[in-house]
Amino acid sequence: MEKIYSDVMISMSEFKKNPAAVLRDAKSRPVAVLNHNKAAFYMIEPALFEALLEELDDQELNRKVLSRMSERSKAIEVDIDDI
């Protein structure tokens, strides 16, 4: 069985009846919309979506930092006053 990453779930047919009510009733929690008992999509509020994107950006930045730190031998020393 497929894992569902939400404690709030609703069928696709119920969701289509009144999406705004589903969002309201979820009280800011993610909602898994199911089609044949499998998650078809997740509905989340904009603030949570933005937080997820920021976390992904932070993870990407962390990967870049770690990658560049492994190339420190190629670094060129500069004086901050010369910039």
Image (cartoon, rainbow, N blue to C red):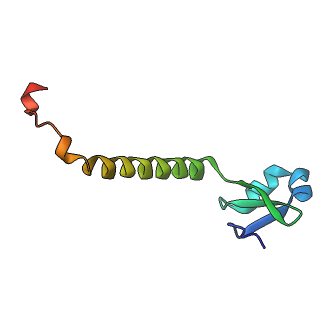
Q: Is residue 65 above or below residue 1?
A: above
62 or 26, which is in the foreground? 62
Left or right of 66? Residue 45 is right
61 or 70, which is in the foreground? 70
Residue 14 lies in quadrant: bottom right
Q: Is residue 28 above or below residue 4?
A: above
Residue at 37% across, 52% down? 62
Left or right of 78? Residue 18 is right
Tell me residue 34's x, y (percent). 83, 61
Left or right of 60? Residue 23 is right
Residue at 76% across, 69% down? 2
- Viewport quadrant of the N terminus: bottom right
Q: Is residue 80 above or below residue 37?
A: above
Residue 12 lies in quadrant: bottom right
Q: Residue furthest bottom?
A: 1
Tell me residue 18's x, y (percent). 87, 51
- Viewport quadrant of the C terminus: top left
23 or 74, which is in the foreground? 74
Tell me residue 68's x, y (percent). 29, 46
Residue at 18% across, 40% down? 75
